[in-house]
Image (cartoon, rainbow, N blue to C red):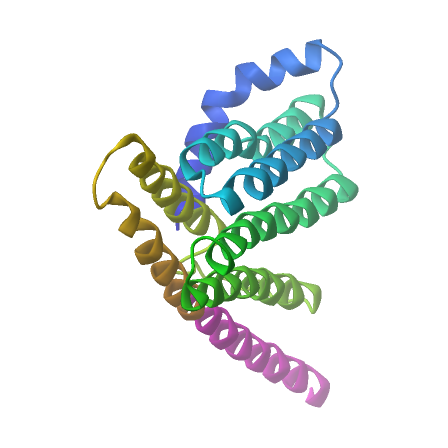
Amino acid sequence: MLNKYARAFFTRVLTPFAALLIRLGISPDAVTLIGTGGVVAGALIFYPQGEFFWGTVVITLFVFSDLVDGNMARQLGRSSRWGAFLDSTLDRVADSAIFGGLALWYAGAGNSLTLCAIAIFCLASGQVVSYTKARGEAIGLPVAVNGLVERAERLVITLVACGLSGLHTFGVPGIETLLPIALWIVAIGSTVTLGQRVVTVRRESAEADAIARGGNSA
C-alpha cells in the first residue's frame, strides 16, 4: 500500500542525490551492496544490545539505498535483470537482519520468548509474502493485489516503533511498549497479506487455465 505513494515521493526527493553519485562514478550495484551492508550492521550490532534508537538511525541512513540504486539505473538508462535480481535478493537479507536482530534481543536480555517467536514469525512471513509474488509472476500471473502489509509497511511500522522505543533509554517512560505492539501488527498484517496473495494467485491461475482450455478446445 505504501509502496505506491511513498516510492514516487522519495524517488523525486532522492533524484538529485542519485545524480551526484553517478557523477562521482559510483555504480548502482555498489550502492545496493553498501546499503545492505549498513542495514545489516546496524540491525545486528545495535538491536541485540537493546540500542533501538541508534540502531534505527543507522538503518534509516542506509535503507534508502533501495530507492537510490534503481533511480541511478534509470538515469543511466541501464536497468537490468541482474540489477533487479540483486536488489530483490539483498532486500531479503536486510529484512532478515532487522527481525533477526530483534529476535536476538528478546531471546537474550529482552527476556521474552514470546516476542522472540513473533519476531522470527515476522521474518519468515515477510520472506514468504515476497516469495508468493515472485513465484506467481514466475508462472506468468500478474499477482495484481495490493497487500495490507507489504515490505514498505513492514519496514515503516517496525523501524518507527524501534526508534521510538529506543527513547526509553533517554528517560521517556512507557514508550518501549510500542515495539511489541508493532511486532504483533506486522505479524498479523503479514498473515493477512499472505492470504490475499494466495487467494489472488488461485483466482488468476484458475482464470488462466480456463482461457487455456478454451483456446485448446477451439
Depth check, front residue: 40 or 108: 108
Which image quarter is the C terminus in?
bottom right
Answer with the quarter of the image where residue 67 lies. Answer: top right
97 above or below 75? below
Q: Where is residue 98 in the image (x, y as percent from the top left)?
A: 54, 47
Which residue is painted at 74% across and 39% down in the image? 83
Q: State the count of labels.
A: 0
Compared across the picture, whether 165 is left or right of 52 comes to: left
Q: Position of residue 21 (x, y in %)?
A: 66, 15
173 above or below 114? above
Q: Residue furthest left?
A: 173
Q: Where is residue 104 in the image (x, y as percent from the top left)?
A: 54, 54
Compared across the picture, whether 178 is left or right of 159 comes to: left
Answer with the quarter of the image where residue 147 lies. Answer: bottom left
Which residue is painted at 59% across and 77% down in the image? 205
Which residue is painted at 65% across and 37% down in the image? 36
Answer with the quarter of the image where residue 24 lies. Answer: top right
Task: Judge whether residue 211 is colored magenta.
Answer: yes
Depth check, front residue: 165 or 86: 165
123 above or below 14? below
Task: Judge whether residue 45 is colored magenta.
Answer: no
Magenta span: 193-218
Depth check, front residue: 1 or 163: 163
Which residue is painted at 45% across and 67% down in the image? 113
